Image (cartoon, grey):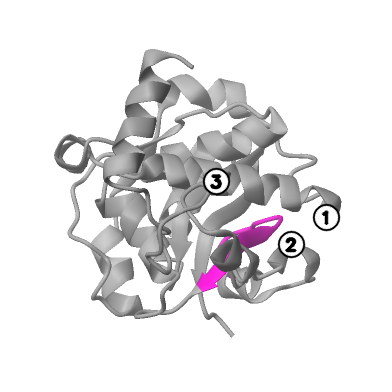
Amino acid sequence: MNIKDLISSAIDVVMPASCSVCGKPLGTGEKFLCRKCLLELPRTHYEEINFNPFEQLMAGKIPVERCASYFFYQKGDPYASILHDIKYRNMPTMGRWLTERAAKQMSGSHFFDSIEAIVPVPLHYTKLASRGYNQSEYLAKGVSRATGIPVIKAIKAVKEHSTQTHKDAVERQKNIEGAFAVSKRHIAGLQGKHVLIVDDVVTTGATLLACATVLHNAIPEARISLFTLAAAQLE
């Protein structure tokens, strides 16, 4: 056991790690979530459903190949704490761990088979400086770990915008207008490629739609699919 592991073990003795969902101390072999909460994770199984609710949300707005999310969440639901921990409580590694797990569990559906590049939804530099990390980049890296598909930061945030959390669909769409652009140095490399845009959650789909739109406009030949760790109940 190295020094880092010894320190981590000592911290766990004094302040045991707890489950992000139920708050109970984690047992041996458990990581981020206890076995019970992990077993009861409300999976969407969107990757197994033709024209699933996520795909319906995007229909007629932008050409997308496939859309999927790992689990459902609702405001106030215990599983919503996963998103808060990843995004606001300095636990992005839990997101990377979950998306790696998700990609492995979804392998039988062949959802990721033709994907050639993974593009995380970006953060504006002011928000990145404040938070210290882009949670979507960690989520993209988790998928990459499971699939071997490279992560390419091809979309950049060019305009700061306020949080989308308490806005309705129309307000979200207006708030995000002009917020993203495609990095010119990546355009040639993504010509004709199948690109997977990754974010933490889909609710109205405004952020993902904005990213997909700028990518489609800059590289019309690229095929686009979407993946999020979580989804609001879209039915």
Residue 213 in the image: state x and y as whole percent: 48, 52
The residue pinned by badge 1 equals: 109
Which of the two residues, 217 or 46, is positioned nearer the viewer here?
Answer: 46
- N-terminal label among 1 and 3: 3
Q: Residues within 10 Å of mark 3 (few under 14, many from 20)?
A: few
**CB-based contact (under 8 Å), mark 1 and mark 2:** yes
Q: Amino acid at mark 2?
A: Glu
Cα separation between marks 1 and 2: 6 Å
| Image side of residue 215 versus residue 183, left or right | right
Q: Residues within 10 Å of mark 1 (few under 14, many from 20)?
A: some
The residue pinned by badge 3 equals: 28
Residue 150 in the image: state x and y as whole percent: 61, 26
Q: Secondary structure at mark 3?
A: loop
| Image side of residue 62 versus residue 21, left or right | right
Is 69 within the magenta? yes
Which residue corresponds to the image point at 55% horizontal and 67% vertical from the top-left?
37
Q: Residues within 10 Å of mark 2 (few under 14, many from 20)?
A: many
Q: Amino acid at mark 1?
A: Ser
Is 223 within the magenta? no
Q: Is residue 101 something one can see in this rendering?
A: yes
Q: Is residue 120 something one can see in this rendering?
A: no
The quarter of the picture where residue 143 lies is top right
The residue pinned by badge 2 equals: 47
- N-terminal label among 1 and 2: 2
Q: Which residues are magenta?
A: 60-72
**CB-based contact (under 8 Å), mark 2 and mark 3:** no
Which residue corresponds to the image point at 35% horizontal and 41% vertical from the top-left?
12
Q: Residue furthest top?
A: 2
- N-terminal label among 2 and 3: 3
Q: Secondary structure at mark 1?
A: helix
